[in-house]
Amino acid sequence: MRDSMYLRISGFLFDSSEDDSLKFELKIDPSLTEQIVQLLGHRNLNAMSAGEWLLTSEQVTQLSSSLGQPLPADLKLLIGLVA
């Protein structure tokens, strides 16, 4: 993985029909990348590069624990690889 690439969690309103703007953004510390990839059940980071992945409430809970900080439960959260 190049230094300029990282995982990012993005949050949007569940009902984005009137407001589809970004409400939450978190750059994941690169030292946690491998752990996060495995937690989400992907083979490797390249498998995640196909786009953004919608996180389930269970995954959000697991990620909150791994990251050591709460993630918003009132938003639709996605994770993806950003260059």
Image (cartoon, rainbow, N blue to C red):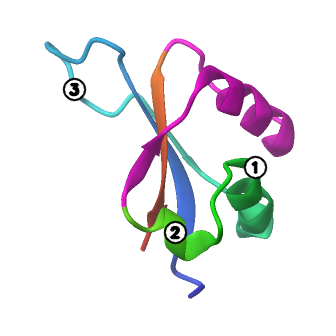
| Callouts 1 and 2 close, C-beta under 8 Å | no
- Spatial CA distance of label 1 from label 2 is 13 Å
Pointer 3: residues within 10 angstroms few (<14), some, or many (20+)? Answer: few
- Left or right of 26: which side holds 58? right
At numbered mark 1, what does the secondary structure look like: helix, strand or loop? Answer: helix
| Callouts 1 and 3 close, C-beta under 8 Å | no
- Left or right of 81: which side holds 17? left
Which residue is under mark 2? 47
Q: Is residue 65 above or below residue 52?
A: above
Q: Quadrant of the C terminus?
A: bottom left
Q: Is residue 17 magenta?
A: no
Residue at (78% x, 61% y) in the render: 32
Q: Earlier in the sequence, mark 1 or mark 2?
A: 1
Magenta stretch, residue numbers: 51-74
Which residue is under mark 1? 39
**Label 1 vs label 3, nearer the camera:** 1
- Spatial CA distance of label 1 from label 3 is 28 Å
Task: Provide residue 67's location: percent of width, then percent of height.
Answer: 79, 43
Which residue is under mark 3? 20
